[in-house]
Amino acid sequence: MGDQKSDDARHLETLDRDLARYSNLESATGYMTRPLVGPGLAFVFIMLAGLFAVLFFGTDGGNTAIVVIAACFGAYMALNIGANDVANNMGPAVGANALTMGGAILIAVIFESAGALIAGGDVVSTIAKGIIAPESMGDASTFIWAMMAALLAAALWVNLATWVGAPVSTTHSVVGGVMGAGIAAAGFAAVNWPTMGKIAASWVISPVLGGLIAAGFLALIKSRIIYQDDKIAAARKWVPVLVAIMAGAFAAYLSVKGLKKIIKIDLQTSLLIGLALGAATWAIMIPVIKKQSEGLENRNKSLKVLFAIPLIVSAAMLSFAHGANDVANAVGPLAAIVQASQSGDFTAAVSIPIWVMVIGALGISFGLFLFGPKLIRMVGGQITKLNPMRAYCVALSAAITVIVASWLGLPVSSTHIAVGGVFGVGFFREWDAERRLKKARREMPDRPALTREERARRKLVRRSHFMTIIAAWVITVPAAAILSAVIFFGLITFAG
């Protein structure tokens, strides 16, 4: 009887060990397959985009297969725009803890899609805004292969940048892809070099202008609010002004850049719209901020409460404007391929069919949902530490910089502006901290000087991220161009 109980106990012990092994195997399998969920869902979306193309383009024409492949490439590009570009709008708000990651993704998905579908440009100038001369392509077939190469090359480059953790300009990626394919197809003479010169200048102008404006607003907030004895009284005076500037800037931004499909508004009219809305917002916000600030303690932490809602609204507006403008990066070449495949005309302006716009809008949203958190965390917290005031300066500088650039006629990148704003805020904080330290040393000459290690720790911008991002910006156009040329020759060889 005792032996029977001992055998039963051993069997139960063995069974427990086996069940534990199965449990461990199940956990290990889940851990191993989790990284594959995102790419798997992305692949399903790309295949659905191809099916979408079949349903709407039809199967009568001889170029159906090409359009289906192009739709898959366009969906892939849209996914990468969502994974990389949208982080610039949402990163500061998440880094400042004004939004959770889930809340940021939800807001971005809604407003990116709304911007793309409601206000997305219905006409894209011939071959990616005049980068190359369309007549140099010779025939529709060469043009189609060039656009295919440009689309795939841009998507691959943005995918690589996202994997590395560098926020790059999808606009510049598409420009590089179109330029590379154009050179491969028709030689260097096909490229519109004055336009390329403007784009190259924007590599410097965009981040510097964005950084200077963001630093300027942070300096204003610090001097007029944070360094004041009565911070709450100062906030009641200045926060309505800052919110009014934001409202006016976004009104002008959206009217001049984001609503072209609905109504065309010139820059002067858009500035008047911004001024009127800014004045109305200022009048509304005075009692709102006064009530919101009641009972707050006289310290910096209390000020964050007053900037949280304006920051969330600014992130939503940036997403709307981004969806309206940058969806063309994904669907512009795809729309050109569709038009050339249908009519054989590849020199006229390109109209974007609604089904193509839907692929772009859904792809951007889906890419953000699946892959966006990595870049959101990097932009929001790993370049420099952000709070609602600093993040607000970044969002405000993005809107104002686009307006200034539009007035000057400069092609700028929303990525470069937003990340430049983050750099500007971080470098200003370093300069301000050093200035205050020198002032304290003059007042207390006996205070010991900082060691080199202590000075290094006080640097508020991570230099490794700074160098990685700058390097990625510099090589985006040439890298996408080289990759596009190689893909173009491969496609021509395969097709031939």
Image (tube, rainbow, N blue to C red):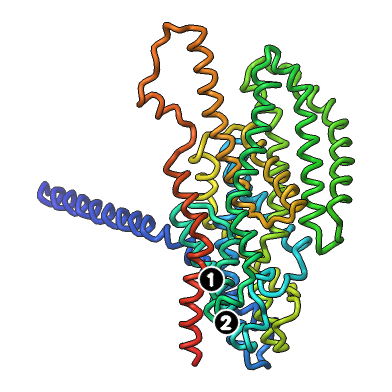
- Image position, residue 121 (x, y; %): 76, 65
Determine whether the residue tagged by mark 1 lies in a helix, strand or loop: helix
Left or right of 9: which side holds 496? right
Q: Nearer the viewer, residue 202 or 215?
A: 202
Inspect this view and state whether residue 369 appears.
no
Dot 2: within a 10 Å radius of its alpha carbon, few (fewer than 14), some, or many (20 or more) residues? some
Q: Is residue 496 above or below residue 70?
A: below
Left or right of 267: which side holds 160? left
Q: Tell me the amino acid under the disc marked 1.
A: Val
Q: Is residue 284 above or below residue 262?
A: above
Dot 1: within a 10 Å radius of its alpha carbon, few (fewer than 14), some, or many (20 or more) residues? few
Inspect this view and state whether residue 457 appears.
yes
- Image position, residue 41 (x, y; %): 52, 65
Mark seen at residue 44: 1
Which residue is at 45% across, 57% downward?
A: 163
Q: How many marks?
A: 2
Mark seen at residue 377: none
Which residue is at 42% across, 58% downward?
A: 35
Q: Nearer the viewer, residue 185 or 254?
A: 185
Cα separation between marks 1 and 2: 36 Å
- Image position, residue 153 (x, y; %): 51, 70
Which residue is at 57% across, 78% downward?
A: 148
Which residue is at 55% across, 82% downward?
A: 185
Q: Tell me the amino acid under the disc marked 2.
A: Ala
- Image position, residue 435 (x, y; %): 54, 21
Q: Quadrant of residue 425?
A: top right
Determine whether the residue tagged by mark 2 lies in a helix, strand or loop: helix
Q: Is residue 173 above or below residue 462?
A: below
Residue beneath disc 2? 186
User: Which of pointers 1 and 2 lies earlier in the amino acid sequence?
Assistant: 1
